[in-house]
């Protein structure tokens, strides 16, 4: 009997980058945007005093990460540096509805899901106005007044089609600015310390909800056979605005047949962006293979039990033989089951830096709700543990939660990280 390949799958979220000291919260990105805008307004940008320009990085009201500031200064003569093409930055950051909106908006929470929920709130407000046949311009709501000012700047007439067009254009610019920030700033920050839990892990596959290449560049070089799935795309500075393919949007909020028929805002939705940007979703194939393994193992185990019992009934006649030793039969069967299980090891899922939010419910359920999978979820504090427990209940349901996290041999366990 041959041993089936055991998969070790690492699932990482933004907490993975944060644990490495990287400024990848959405607030870090917005601070960077404000810093870039301030830098672009310095007289030295258009002048010849390059030294004064770079020194000014230390005196901004919008304080960016020291690590990023050091990288900007260190790479000031590099054509690939983020400041090498200031006109590009100006085109992305200036007169951008979304970046201006978030600069003024107080967002509750620090996760990217909170950022995306704010985008969704704006879209839903406009959508509701359309649904209720309200003339947007007469509402007096700051969001619609603001939309109108951006339309005027582009010489677009005020109508629903142009509002959607403007919001999509600026979302695309925001996505590209984020891509440049991550690829030219974050991916260039040197990481000296390794996370103990990750350094001791040898995954066969990595599922990343991040746009950064942190795992690949810090841990991945030791194993060229690791397969990667960047569910929301991977930041790449070599692209341009038109072929940027990172996913940044909202979840489906319709709960009736409008989700199939009303497609005015579909380009803001992540499921559509994933297909449009050709995100391969390799993890779907991996989850399907694990499920197939589970079904095969169940059939094989059932066959083993039935075959052994039938053999005993035919050859040893336990019913008619008073001397029959049931304990010997049970030991023999248990031994054969142990051999079977040793040759069919359970797959291992490790989740690090992910909040288990319901927006990722689909892929999480496909992975962990299998009988041939053991899942380890890392948390960094008691509060994050409590939040992850609640989110896990939302993802898999109360009954599955109780069964899989309790008992003597749970197949979902939580472990506190040794490093934060």
Image (cartoon, grey):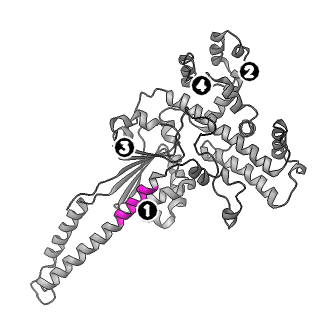
Query: Which residues are drawn in magenta?
Result: 284-294
Earlier-in-chain disc, 1 versus 2: 2
Identity of the residue furthest to the bottom in this view: 320
Q: 10 Å neighbourhood of mark 4: few (<14), some, or many (≥20)?
A: many
Q: Residue at x 64, y 52 (%)?
A: 269
Residue 106 lies, in percent from the top left, at: 72, 40
Alpha carbon distance from label 1 to label 4: 43 Å
Is 168 magenta? The answer is: no
What residue did someone put label 4 on?
82
What residue did someone put label 3 on?
226
* Residue 177 located left or right of residue 347: right
Q: Residue at x 42, y 58 (%)?
A: 287
Alpha carbon distance from label 3 to label 2: 45 Å
* Residue 249 located left or right of residue 216: right
- The overriding secondary structure of the stretch rendered in magenta is helix
Identity of the residue furthest to the left in this view: 323
Residue 371 visible in the displayed image? no
Considering the numbered disc 4 on the image, is that residue within a helix, a strand or a loop?
Answer: loop
Considering the numbered disc 1 on the image, is that residue within a helix, a strand or a loop?
Answer: loop
Q: Which label number is shown at residue 41?
A: 2
Q: 10 Å neighbourhood of mark 2: few (<14), some, or many (≥20)?
A: few
Between tags 1 and 2, which lies in front? 2
Residue 363 visible in the displayed image? yes
Q: Are marks 3 and 1 in contact (CB under 8 Å)?
A: no
Alpha carbon distance from label 4 to label 3: 30 Å
Between tags 1 and 4, which lies in front? 4
């Amino acid at each position: 009997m041959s041993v089936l390949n055991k998969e070790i799958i690492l699932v990482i979220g933004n907490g993975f980058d944060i644990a490495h000291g990287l400024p990848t919260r959405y607030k870090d990105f917005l601070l960077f945007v404000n810093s870039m805008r301030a830098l672009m307004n310095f007289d030295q940008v258009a002048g010849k005093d390059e030294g004064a320009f770079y020194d000014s990085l230390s005196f901004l009201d919008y304080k960016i990460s020291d690590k990023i500031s050091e990288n900007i200064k260190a790479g000031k003569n590099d054509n690939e540096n983020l400041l090498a093409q200031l006109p590009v930055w100006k085109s992305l950051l200036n007169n951008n509805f979304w970046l201006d909106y978030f600069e003024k908006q107080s967002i509750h929470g620090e996760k990217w899901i909170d950022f995306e929920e704010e985008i969704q709130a704006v879209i839903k407000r406009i959508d509701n106005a359309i649904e209720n046949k309200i003339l947007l311009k007469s509402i007096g709501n700051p969001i619609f007044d603001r939309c109108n000012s951006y339309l005027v700047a582009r010489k677009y007439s005020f109508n629903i089609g142009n509002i959607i067009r403007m919001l999509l254009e600026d979302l695309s610019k925001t996505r590209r600015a984020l891509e440049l920030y991550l690829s030219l700033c974050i991916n260039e920050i040197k990481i000296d310390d390794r996370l103990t839990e990750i350094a001791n892990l040898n995954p066969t596959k990595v599922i990343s909800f991040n746009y950064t290449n942190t795992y690949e560049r810090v841990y991945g070089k030791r194993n060229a056979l690791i397969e990667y799935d960047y569910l929301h795309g991977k930041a790449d500075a070599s692209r341009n605005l038109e072929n940027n393919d990172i996913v940044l949007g909202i979840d489906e909020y319709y709960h009736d047949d409008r989700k199939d028929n009303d497609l005015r805002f579909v380009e803001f939705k992540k499921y559509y962006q994933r297909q449009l940007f050709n995100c391969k979703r390799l993890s779907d194939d991996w989850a399907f293979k694990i499920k197939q393994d589970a079904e095969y193992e169940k059939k094989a185990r059932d066959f083993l039990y039935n075959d052994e019992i039938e053999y005993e009934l035919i050859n040893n006649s336990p019913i008619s033989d008073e001397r029959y030793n049931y304990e010997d039969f049970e030991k023999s069967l248990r031994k054969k089951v142990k051999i079977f299980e040793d040759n069919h090891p359970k797959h291992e899922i490790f989740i690090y830096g992910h909040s288990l939010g319901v927006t990722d419910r689909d892929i999480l359920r496909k992975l962990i709700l299998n009988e041939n999978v053991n899942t380890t979820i890392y948390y960094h504090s008691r509060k994050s543990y409590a939040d992850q427990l609640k989110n896990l209940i939302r993802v898999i349901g109360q009954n599955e939660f109780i069964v899989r996290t309790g008992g003597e041999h749970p197949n979902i366990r939580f472990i506190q990280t040794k490093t934060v």
